[in-house]
Amino acid sequence: MLSESERELIAAAVDGILAPAGDASFRLLIADSSEAVILFQQLQLNSARLKSAPRYAAPASLAPQVLNRVANLPRPVPTTVGRQPLAVRGRPNLVPYGLAAAVLLSVASASFWYAWDDARKSEVYAQRERLPNPIEPPPSQPVPARTLPSEPPIQVLPPAVPSAGPVEVAVLPTPPEAAPTPRTFGSDGLVASPPLTDVKPFESVQLRLPLLLSMSELEKEDARSKLRDELSRDPAYRIDLFTRDAAKAVDVFQTVCKVAGVHLAIDAVAKDRMAKKLPSSWVIYSEVLTADELAQLVVQLSKATERPIATAHVIPAQQAEQRELRDLLGVDPGLWKRPKTAPKPISANTGDQIVANLLKGKTVEKPALLMTYSPANARSVAATSKEIKSFLERREERKPNAVPVMIVIRMSN
């Protein structure tokens, strides 16, 4: 598509007002652009048609009719203030004459345009028969360079420039091939990899999803059995308890721990936030409970009268849980650490040993630690917390059947 400056350059060449400096640019444009050639031919043809159009005079009766129409117009009455008119006396009123001249000019222009339009159409039809077709012949025929037509009565001249000469019209380029010719190949031309012979059949993969249980489900035996089985599969776990009232949920958790024989030590910062009922999430860490004891603890939470905890999410502990516990406790908890010696099988006199210990007034202690989980800036500093230091000092070698667990009591959305 031609730009505005290129169109102006072609129009200047047609009108004969092309400057000497623009002659080289015009000739280069004509030689390189077929669209410029077509526009140049059209403008030259239009210019020749306008110059050869006949001129028609207005009818002789037009002027008297206009003057008669103007004379019959009502004359304006000047506005006066007192006895003196606003208009200056002695100066003629030229408004009617201006109106008459405007009407006369409009009628004359309309008559000329109507007559010229008919003559132009007749001339276009006549010239279309005489002028050659600007479209190039097929590529198979030789295409000689041609000049603009100069047949009478229209004479097409080259631009009036100092170095004027016959302007050669650039030959339109041969259009490129729309698409390559289809080619066929035999089987010898195909290139492919050898067929696979050692393809193994698909094997089923069993996915393991985290266990999500509502507290109401734990009323059924199959849900409790599923919880115990899940807690027996991995060496360490994380249990998220979702609630809408974290303060009430932590109170119920403390009560259940007392019933289950779990000694729950509460960090001083967490105890202060509980007393002030500040919005918080809580974390409990224990590494002495077995899988059955953990399952029983969760089941006891589901049996609470108010039941502030709605759901329990049980997932195996990962590196993220170990990093969080290391930040909370100040030491690596060693979630996957186990005794070097293999555990001894349960003997038949285990029950007798437990009874003997009870008779001696000794009870098996099950320590756990409760701390602030969130907000993170409200957590205790492990190095300055007495409760955390006491919990770490009382740690013993982990039993083979113990399952370290990180329990988080958190708000549900």
Image (tube, rainbow, N blue to C red):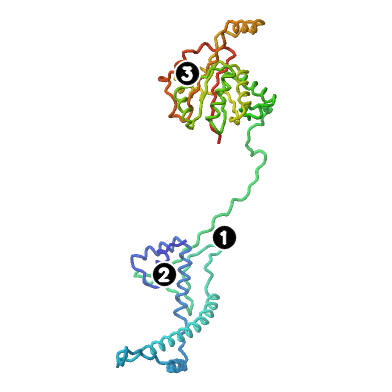
Label located before the other in sequence (1 or 2): 2
Residue that appears at 41% across and 71% down: 14
Q: Which quarter of the image is occupied by the C terminus?
A: top right
Looking at the rendered structure, which numbered label has been put on residue 118?
none
Residue toward you, 206 or 326 = 326
Q: CA distance from mark 2 to mark 3?
A: 88 Å
Residue toward you, 322 or 403 = 403
In the image, what residue type sits under mark 3? Asp
Neighbour class for label 3 at 10 Å: few (<14), some, many (≥20)? few
Label located before the other in sequence (3 or 1): 1
State the image quarter where residue 222 is shown.
Answer: top right
Residue that appears at 61% across and 5% down: 356
Helix, strand or loop status at disc 1: loop
Indicate the position of residue 267 as horizontal and vertical percent values.
Answer: 46, 22
Determine which residue is flagged by label 1: 140
In the image, what residue type sits under mark 1? Ser
Helix, strand or loop status at disc 2: helix
In the image, what residue type sits under mark 2? Ala
Label located before the other in sequence (2 or 3): 2
Residue that appears at 48% across and 84% down: 110
Indicate the position of residue 330 as horizontal and vertical percent values.
Answer: 44, 20
Determine which residue is flagged by label 3: 332
Which of label 3 and label 1 is nearer to you? 3
Neighbour class for label 2 at 10 Å: few (<14), some, many (≥20)? some
Looking at the rendered structure, which numbered label has been put on residue 11?
2
Q: Would residue 28 be seen by someone viewing this image from the given angle?
A: yes
Helix, strand or loop status at disc 3: loop
